Amino acid sequence: MSCVLCDTDGGRLVWRGQRLRVIHAEEAGFPAFYRVIWNAHVAEFSDLSEQDRAHCMQAVTLVEELLRAQLAPTKINLATLGNVVPHLHWHVVARFDWDSHFPAPLWAQAQRARDAAREAAVAQRLPALELALKQRLELLN
């Protein structure tokens, strides 16, 4: 059985460690959408050892902290669903009160038209954010 997160990075790779990786997801309308993906194929968070769960949550927290510090979003959304891709991964998404779906979830109906200028302004800040992510994640490895 094939798994897209075993066969590919799952997005644009930002950083890869021994146990997990962080990717930038190319999700239209959400320029600061990241995923923390466990490298080994496991379906559920409880499949990990206590030590691995702690490591995973440290990475999720680190991504959240840096998104907040560098982008000052209105809210951070965290999710781990796995219904479509049953491979452990966390969504870490910076949400802004101007984004097309806010305050509704990403998968809900859009509340307003996309703001391309604001999306582009966030996207321009991602290289510095990702450099900081790499430096901080390397300390976790």
Image (spheres, helix red, strand yellow):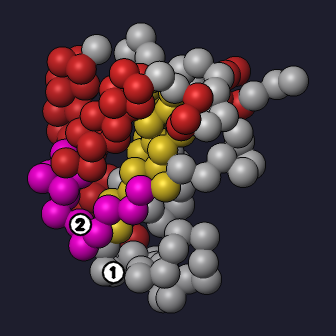
Label 1 environment density (alpha carbons within 10 Å; few <14, some 14–19, many ≥20) = some
Name the mark on residue 136: none
Whether residue 70 appears in this view of the structure is: yes
Q: Residue 89 appears at what percent x and percent y?
A: 53, 39
- Callout 1 touching callout 2 (CB < 8 Å): no
How far is disc 1 from disc 2 in space, using C-alphas?
10 Å
Q: Nearer the viewer, residue 8 or 123?
A: 8
Q: Is residue 75 magenta?
A: yes
Seen at 55% across and 83% down, the residue is 110
- In x, y percent, where is residue 72? 16, 63
In the drawing, does residue 75 fall left or right of residue 112? left
On the image, the x and y values in percent for residue 83 come to 72, 51
Quarter location, residue 1:
top right
> Residue 132, located in which quarter of the rendered image?
top left
Over which residues does the magenta segment extend? 66-78
- Single out the mark in the foreground, 1 or 2: 2
Q: Amino acid at mark 1?
A: Trp
The crowding category of the residue bearing disc 2, from other C-alpha atoms within 10 Å (few below 14, some 14 to 19, many at least 20), is some
Check disc 1 and report the residue beneath it.
Answer: 98
90 shown above or below 136: below
- Looking at the image, is mark 1 or mark 2 earlier in the sequence? 2
Q: The residue tagged with tag 2: helix, strand or loop? A: loop
Circle 1: element type: loop
- The amino acid beneath tag 2 is Pro
Horizontal side, residue 135 vs residue 38: left or right: left
Name the residue located 25 percent from the left edge and 25 percent from the top edge. 137
Tell me: residue 30, above or below residue 138. Answer: below
Please indicate, yes or no, whether residue 131 appears anywhere in the rendered image: no
